[in-house]
Amino acid sequence: MNRFLNLFRARRESRDLAVEIEEHLEERAQELMASGLDRKSAELAARRAFDNVTRVREVSREMWTWASLERLIR
């Protein structure tokens, strides 16, 4: 049963992270548009400044995994 619940928790955390990343990207794009860039250029610049979104998600998942492992060990 715990594995089943963990699957849903992991999906929820992954979804929450994706939403948070998109919010950060949108906020930065808005800042760039306020400084004079058009929407497309601002979105591209925000993504470049944020770095690799996929890598950020992978690193976050790795941290969640280690946190779960540490809890188990305790």
Image (cartoon, grey):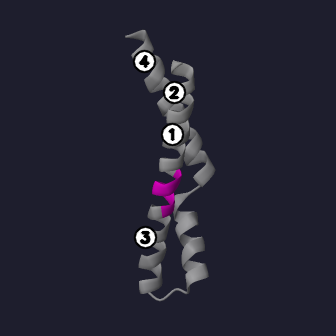
Relative vertical location of residue 16 with respect to residue 2 in this rendering, above or below: below
> What residue is shown with label 3?
27
Residue at the (56%, 82%) spot, across then down: 39
Q: Are marks 2 and 4 in contact (CB under 8 Å)?
A: no
* Residue 66 on the magenta span: no
Residue at the (48%, 32%) spot, across then down: 63
Q: Which mark is residue 70?
A: 4
C-alpha span from label 4 to label 3: 34 Å
Q: Secondary structure beneath disc 2? A: helix
Residue at the (56%, 45%) spot, across then down: 57
User: Which of the two discs, 1 and 2, labels the residue nearer the N terminus?
Assistant: 2
| Pair 2/4: label in front | 2
Q: Which mark is residue 5?
A: 2
- Rate crowding at label 3 as few (under 14), some (14 to 19) or many (20 or more) other CA atoms within 10 Å: some
User: Which of the two discs, 1 and 4, labels the residue nearer the N terminus?
Assistant: 1
Closer to the camera in the image, 11 or 28: 11
Kind of residue indicated by mark 3: Glu
C-alpha span from label 2 to label 4: 18 Å
Kind of residue indicated by mark 1: Ser
Region in magenta? 18-22
Q: Is residue 17 left or right of residue 40?
A: left
> What residue is shown with label 1?
60
